[in-house]
Amino acid sequence: MTISDYLVTDDLTVLLGFIGVSVFLLQNLYKPQPLVHPILLGRQSDAGRVRHSGESAVYRNYGTGLMGRFPVRPDKDVNVVTDFVKPEFDAPRTLWSTKITNAQLKARVSAFGSGIATLVPEGSTVLILLNDCIEFVITDLALSEQSIASITLSSPKLLARVLEMHPPDAIITDNTFLPHVSQAARDARNNHKLIVVDFLPPRFSETARVMYSWQEVESLGKVPQTPKNAPQPGSAYTVSFFETPSGGMRCVQLSHENFTSGVTAIKALFPAAINLSTLDTIVSSHSLSTPYGRAIAYAALFEGASFATLPSTSVYRDGDAPALDVADILSVTKFPIPSPTVLFLKPEHVQSLTSSVTDRAKKSSFIFPLAWRHKFAGLTEGFLTKDSLWDRTVFGSAREDVLGKMADTVKAIVISGGLLPSDVLVPARLALSIPLINTYTHGSATGPLFATHAFDLQMLPSSSPAAEPAHAGAPSVNVEAKLVGVNDSVVEKGADPIGEILVRGPSVGNMLAADGEAGEKNAWVHTGEMARVMTNGAFKVLGSI
Amino acid sequence: MAYILDFGTPVNTALLIYILYSVQKIVFPSTSIPKTIPSEFKHGYSWMPKEHPPTVLFKTYTPKTLEPFSGKDGGRILLAINSIVFDVTAGRNFYGPDGMYGNFAGRDASRGMAKQSFDLDMLTAVDQPLDKLQDLRSDEIENMKGWIDHFSNKYVICGKLVENDAA
């Protein structure tokens, strides 16, 4: 047979030819596009050109740049904390269980402020020992307006020490914690006034203490009293005590500017496609007694979004802490808030959520391995969506079974308050299919210190033999960071610097010494945690020293 | 089917094999991750640059150790104003050996910056103590501070200058 006999073509050839061409085009043109161009992920922070011996260079967010000014307020009119409640915005929104408009909130804040101004003089200190509720927010804003300093604690173990070293003029607490407070105050031989949320307990006889109920103080303020001096953005109005991992106590002084910068940093976490607006409902797992938790609440206030916190944020409770898992997240549905859209969770919540959704999907569908494989292939190209075919068949129903109505409305999750293990990252991305923003926060700062790009889907293996946590991204828009305790000879050869993180910026508060002396303004703050900088400018936080 | 697999029509067979292979790639996509992280974004989405951006270590210089950095050997060019050492290698046209201000390379240029002069008599010899600048007028000090600002914005501050015996 000749060559021409071999190359015989007929109608079937034409058909197969068409199919072949269309398959070829499908394969090559239908490649998923990455959500963010990989070139941007190769240079996430702007590094200084000079470094001192034993330190790394100073790193800033690439968008801010080394020469840029730090953004300190989300809007030009927001100078003090009470400006977060915008008067021109008049739609009601729900804060925990209270539906309230901005005007009503402002009225309650000034009423409580005037009320408490009749009880304690200006320049005194008030200790707030409340779990998260609307009364906490009103108290905090009222005290800031009246220039009365407030103190918050991140843990009840610090109460005894604080009462001893910095006795307050008044304590605000609630019924469940009242016995502990009285006991601790008796031990410290304090003489102060007590304000209690909810009802006053009937048979509570205290001789040296004067007690008021919270509602009483609010009604005392029917006659508005304006403070002598209007609060300034740079003036400190609250002090927060937090525990170090080794059990020591540290103290940070925060001003209005720290909180406006913190809210700016939190808003900057969300790119334009998923930014915060009045249509959002924010749920947080960080207590308002911590600066970061309060900044999240203020961000919700500023945006006009509804807000609630998870039960695990309660600092002052009887009994054990609730587990950080899916049940904790679901318990927020008992508040009359609209379905949550943005969740600020801890790594344990995300781990629990991922394993629940994945187990559910595995059990309910036999094409789970194929769906997983397809989504993973998309992830290697940097693409992820909630509306793909595989979500509609496999993952969507699993998410709905686990989260209920929330599964449809949640558009982003911010992970802070711990180290996220790197082996959870890929399963979490595939199971939840929404932007997961991993951040690093510290008790001394109101905003996140490091944050990943919302659409960053890179899968970078660990650089050291041991498993490292997932990276926390570049410094936040108004933070600069450097590492100290770095091995010079290793870094000069080109290895990654590893050392203790030091941060500075408008969202980092002023650390106080043990006796209450303020440090110099804008000093570097030692966070007490180690990190490594990668070549693309992202920081990987490794844990405490 | 047998008609196609009959090797009498190899074109059809080849096309069929190609179609089956491509369909298999589409329905079962590859999930392999490369063993080494790519160092260019063109080679993969999960990539990392090979090296950190270059940084200079902040050092303490004396007039004697600063003098070699005059760019004559094609190396870095450093210059000091008011005990701040600047790396002016980027301005080789000005401060290199054949540049207009080449006199200042590797030396303490404070007096020259203050008095706006590039003469050699503005420089002190390297084995002498540092120029105290005490006899300068206040407007000359202001001029020198202006130059320090200009240099801080344009060049990298990479060290400080101390006396010969202090290092």
Image (cartoon, coloured by chain):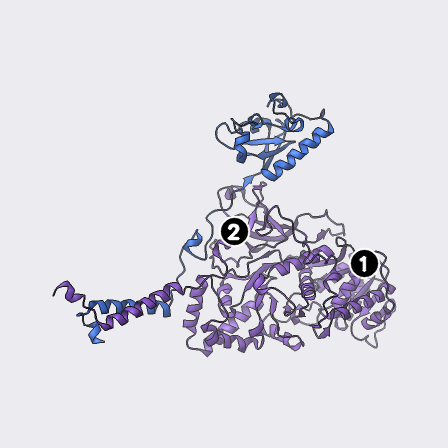
Q: Residue furthest top?
A: B121
Badge 2: residue crowd in 10 Å (few <14, some 14–19, many ≥20): many
Q: Give the residue type that dot 1 points to.
A: Ser
> Position of A464 compared to A511: left or right?
left
Between A494 and A177, which is closer to the camera in this rendering? A494
The subunit letter for the residue under badge 1 reads: A
Between B141 and A323, which is closer to the camera in this rendering? B141
Q: Position of residue A47 (x, y in %)?
A: 56, 47
Q: Mark 2 or mark 1, which is nearer the start of the sequence?
A: 2
> Position of B82 compared to A25: left or right?
right
Instruction: Please give the name of the residue rendered at 51% of the width and 54% of the height, measured from the top-left corner.
Output: A40
Badge 1: residue crowd in 10 Å (few <14, some 14–19, many ≥20): many
Q: Give the residue type that dot 2 points to.
A: Arg
Q: CA distance from mark 1 to mark 2?
A: 43 Å
Q: Position of residue A48 (x, y in %)?
A: 57, 44
Could you tell me how many numbered marks the image carries?
Answer: 2
Question: Which quadrant of the view contains residue A287?
Answer: bottom right
The N terminus of chain A, quarter of image: bottom left
Q: Quick one: which chain is blue? A: B
Q: Quick one: which chain is purple? A: A
User: The residue tagged with tag 1: helix, strand or loop?
Assistant: loop
Q: Pointer 2: what residue?
A: A43
Q: Pointer 1: what residue?
A: A147
User: The residue tagged with tag 2: helix, strand or loop?
Assistant: loop
Q: Does A509 appear above or below A26?
A: above
The subunit letter for the residue under badge 2 reads: A
